[in-house]
Amino acid sequence: MATSPHEYFLKRQMQVALYSLKRQYGGPIVIYRLLNSAVDDETGEVTTNTLSYRVYRAIILPATMTRELLKDLASTPAIKQLMAGGGYDRSRRVFIVDRRDVRDLTISLEDWLVWNGGKFQFEKIEELEFDTGWVITGHVLLGETELETGLQQSVDAADAIMVTSDVDSEVA
């Protein structure tokens, strides 16, 4: 598909802006996609297969704190005030991924990412103009940590691998 000089210039300006942001706010993240999972009926152990993409320089913007309010059955229309302890603080963070770093990646709301030891669930995904990247808004899942596969492997962002965890419980 031929692009006009105007579109080429705008796409190039987006790439320059992303490069500048990566230099100021860049950091490594890993994006995970769940392929399948199975539960052993006898032990209750969950085995998962995930596909992971390492992004060496994603743009990680500062966190935004918001207060979420909980409403339950006790807050009926007759009772206009919330019960004590009806709210909690949630930290949202924005990640921007340059498409040039992960060319064959497609992102969906079921995926998640790991940054700085925390697991972030996606709330919103916006695609940047001219197919240059994604803006991902997510919140940290408290109590959840990085996948405990026992397998440490470094891959390039252009490579996709399937990580499976199969731990033998018998000691020889």
Image (cartoon, rainbow, N blue to C red):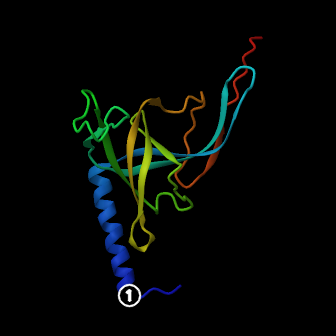
Q: Residue furthest left?
A: 81
Q: Secondary structure at mark 1?
A: helix
Give x and y (percent) for residue 147: 54, 33
On the picture, is 167 further left or further right than 71? right
Q: Is residue 68 left or right of residue 98?
A: left
Count of labels in the image:
1
| Front residue (pair 65, 74) | 74
Q: Which quadrant is home to the C terminus? A: top right
Residue under the image location 59 percent in, 52 percent down: 159
Q: Residue furthest top?
A: 172
Q: Could you tell whether 55 is left or right of 15 in the image?
A: right
**Relative image position of residue 119 (x, y in whole percent):** 44, 37
Task: Say which quarter of the image contains residue 11.
Answer: bottom left
Q: Is residue 5 rendered to the left or right of residue 41?
A: left
Residue at image point 25% right, 36% down: 79
Q: Residue at x 67, y 24 (%)?
A: 45
Residue that numbered label 1 is attached to: 5
Q: Which amino acid lies under the numbered mark 1 shown in the image of this protein?
A: Pro
On screen, residue 15 above or below 96: below
Q: Quadrant of residue 165 in the image?
A: top right
Residue 140 % position (x, y): 39, 38
Quarter of image, res 149: top right
Q: Nearer the viewer, residue 75 or 124?
A: 75
Position above or below: 171 against 11 = above
* 144 relative to 135, above or below: above
